[in-house]
Image (cartoon, helix red, strand yellow):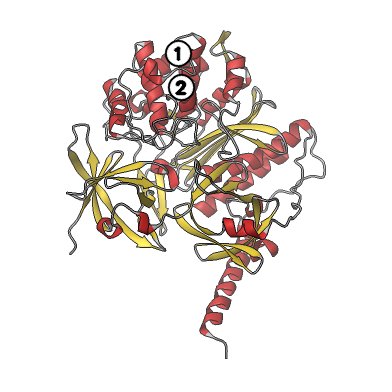
């Protein structure tokens, strides 16, 4: 007689196999991957275009993307540029190369370029404190020995600033004060880390740089950027405010696909113009890439020096405990052996995701935009890298080296014991434990072996990988490229587990906190909360949603993007993981209110 547990296991295996066979059959019926020739003729991009076209249509079907716009650029030649699908489903408006999309954080590249132009002109210094230029800049800090926040540290996301400002500020047309209010709101925030300690992505950092631009240029941020950067580059259909979009152009709607239905997000301006409010077209972004490949020359004018542009592509702060490479406004990494890749993704806030990725030393580039909330950086960057790999082979005959299986080593058993424990990964608890002499990991019910490649680094081994099924499932992350590193802390640094996602991005995972050491009773914090806007006046605005705090797997957790919490004083709670890692939530013991960035969490009475 087979036990119920075994029955459930084999039922799950059968469902998985049926799904894989169905996916394989669906692909066979609908669209076949193009056959790669034994030798790609130098300069002949036909296979690369066929491959990119296949991958895009495959992704559109699998991820329910209403539209995708794509451009492949070789130096000054656009070798392929096209748009597929619908920019607006309700009105059945097709996407074209002139469809305007909101590119979100791709905006940061342009804010960074203008900031570096001011560095060239001597208006600012990279390593001078930001307070030298913005007298209204102030933020609380628990790190008394931290260095001053500089322009360089902000550009490289190493200033320790929180992700966003601490008040909700409504965008007001032709009003420079909105951006100023965002920066001023930092007085109610805390820094997340000391300056230079580790990579911490920050929107408010680039909003601060934007406030510096309008202060030193004497003109509103959007007007100055339009007249002195976008227009000279030739990006005539691009703007930082919705009202300036040419009226004869269609604007894409963002969507979220849920249970066979598309739910639209109307695109509108946010007060964070410098960090996330650029509107553009695939045609204009192709012009921008060619501008970069011309060493930033536009109509005979050098908008920024070539050496300054190259400096923006250089890694600024990475270290063994902080391996995330970051240039000045550009994300950077090494791919295909030793090729420098510079890139930036945007969204997928409000249902639109975008990415521009370049191999600057080879003058090859890819731009991708899609209007569905699943098109995030992990998806777009992986697709861009795959396309660039084929472009590199086409133009130069360079074939990426095969990923060789790492040579296994045998760390001392005492190290395994030091690494074992519970860590916070992507807001979830990941168990690392010993079973016999094998170190294992478990996350969301999936258990895998950790195979050592040196004394601190491990690769994953799982039956999906061993049977080759992971490739058939076409996961957005290649599990064979994923690597886990353990760093044992000391008096200055805590124990850390770092998950390396193919050298594109890194997840920093700290150990779960001890409930016995908490200065606030966890039970006091658990329950349901009403979410209200936090206004500059200090008052609470309209209700924008709800949240909940609960205890699970020995971790105090908040719903949504917040994740695990760690109280560090009677009034301060630290967010342990995710996009808000390291940030402080302010707790009022008397009222039970919790303040974080632009949200006030008000406890609700139980039913």
For the C terminus, give its image quadrant: bottom left
Q: Which mark is residue 124?
A: 1
Residue that sits furthest to the front in the current view = 491
Q: Residue 41 occupies which quadrant of the picture?
A: top right
Residue 497 horizontal/vertical position (percent): 55, 50
Residue 221 pos. (x, y %): 37, 19
Residue 460 in the figure: left or right of residue 597: right
Q: Which mark is residue 61?
A: none
Q: Quadrant of residue 185?
A: top left
Count neighbours of disc 1 (C-alpha within 10 A) and say few if under 14, some if 14 to 19, many if 20 or more: many
Decide if residue 131 is on the left or right side of residue 156: left
| Residue pictured at 55% horizontal, 73% vertical | 12
Which residue bears the numbered disc 2?
Answer: 151
Total marks placed: 2
How many C-alpha atoms fall within 10 Å of the one at disc 2: few (<14), some, or many (≥20)? many
Residue 484 lies left or right of residue 525; in this view the side is right
The quarter of the picture where the N terminus appears is bottom right
Q: Residue, x 75% and y 53% (percent of image)?
A: 405
Nearest the camera: 542 or 454?
454
**Disc 2, SS:** helix
- Are discs 1 and 2 less than 8 Å apart at CB? yes
On the image, the x and y values in percent for residue 357 come to 59, 33
Q: Is residue 120 visible?
A: yes
Residue at 40% from the left image edge and 20% from the top image edge: 130
Residue 90 vertical position relative to residue 267 in the rendered view, above or below: below
Of label 1 and label 2, which has the lower sequence position?
1
Q: Is residue 493 above or below residue 215?
A: below
Front-most of 259 and 596? Answer: 596
């Amino acid at each position: 007689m087979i036990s119920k547990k075994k029955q459930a296991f084999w039922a799950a295996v059968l469902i998985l196999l049926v799904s894989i066979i169905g996916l394989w059959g669906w692909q066979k019926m609908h669209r076949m991957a193009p056959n790669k020739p034994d030798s790609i003729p130098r300069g002949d991009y036909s296979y690369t275009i066929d491959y990119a076209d296949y991958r895009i249509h495959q992704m559109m079907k699998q991820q329910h993307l209403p539209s995708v716009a794509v451009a492949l650029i070789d130096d000054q030649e656009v070798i392929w540029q096209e748009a597929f699908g619908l920019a607006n489903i309700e009105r059945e408006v097709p996407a074209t190369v002139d469809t305007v999309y909101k590119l979100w954080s791709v905006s940061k590249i342009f804010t960074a370029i203008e900031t570096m132009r001011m560095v060239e002109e001597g208006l600012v210094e990279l390593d001078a404190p930001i307070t030298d230029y913005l007298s209204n800049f102030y933020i609380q800090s628990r790190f008394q020995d931290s260095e001053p926040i500089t322009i360089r540290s902000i550009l490289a996301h190493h200033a320790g600033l929180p992700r966003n400002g601490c008040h909700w500020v409504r965008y007001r047309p032709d009003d420079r004060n909105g951006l100023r209010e965002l920066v001023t709101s930092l007085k109610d925030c805390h820094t997340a880390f000391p300056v230079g300690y580790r990579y911490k992505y920050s929107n408010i950092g680039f909003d601060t740089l934007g406030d510096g631009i309008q202060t030193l240029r004497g003109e509103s941020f959007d007007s100055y950027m339009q007249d002195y950067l976008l227009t000279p580059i030739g990006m005539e259909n691009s703007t930082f405010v919705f009202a300036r979009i040419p009226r004869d152009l269609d604007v894409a709607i963002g969507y979220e696909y849920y249970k066979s239905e598309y739910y639209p997000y109307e695109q509108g301006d946010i007060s964070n113009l410098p960090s996330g409010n650029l509107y553009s077209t695939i045609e204009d972004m192709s012009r921008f890439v060619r501008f970069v490949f011309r060493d930033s020359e536009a109509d005979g004018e050098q908008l920024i020096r070539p050496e300054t542009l190259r400096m923006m592509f250089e890694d600024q702060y990475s270290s063994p405990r902080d391996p995330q490479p970051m240039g000045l406004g550009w994300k950077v990494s090494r791919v295909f052996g030793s090729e420098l890749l510079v890139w930036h993704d945007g969204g997928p806030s409000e249902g639109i995701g975008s990415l521009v990725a370049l191999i600057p030393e080879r003058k090859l580039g890819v731009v991708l935009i899609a209007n569905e909330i699943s098109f995030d950086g992990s998806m777009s960057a992986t697709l861009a890298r795959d396309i660039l790999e084929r472009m590199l082979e086409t133009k130069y005959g360079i074939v990426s080296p095969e990923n060789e299986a790492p040579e296994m080593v045998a760390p001392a058993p005492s190290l395994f014991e030091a690494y074992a424990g519970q860590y916070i990964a992507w807001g979830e608890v990941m168990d690392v434990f010993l079973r016999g002499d094998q170190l294992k990991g478990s996350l969301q019910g999936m258990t895998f072996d950790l195979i050592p490649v040196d004394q601190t680094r491990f690769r994953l081994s799982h039956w999906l990988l061993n049977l080759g099924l992971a490739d058939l499932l076409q996961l957005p992350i290649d599990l064979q490229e994923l690597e886990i590193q353990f760093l044992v802390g000391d008096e200055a640094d805590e124990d850390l587990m770092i998950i390396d996602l193919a050298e594109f991005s890194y997840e920093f995972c700290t150990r779960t906190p001890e409930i016995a050491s908490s200065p606030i009773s966890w039970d006091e914090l658990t329950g349901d909360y009403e979410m209200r806007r936090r206004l500059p006046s200090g008052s609470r605005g309209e209700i924008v949603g709800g949240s909940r705090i609960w205890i699970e797997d020995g971790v105090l957790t908040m719903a949504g993007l917040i994740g695990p919490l760690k109280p560090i004083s009677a009034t301060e709670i630290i967010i342990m993981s995710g996009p808000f890692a390291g940030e402080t939530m302010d707790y009022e013991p008397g009222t039970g209110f919790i303040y974080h960035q632009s949200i006030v969490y008000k406890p609700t009475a139980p039913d």
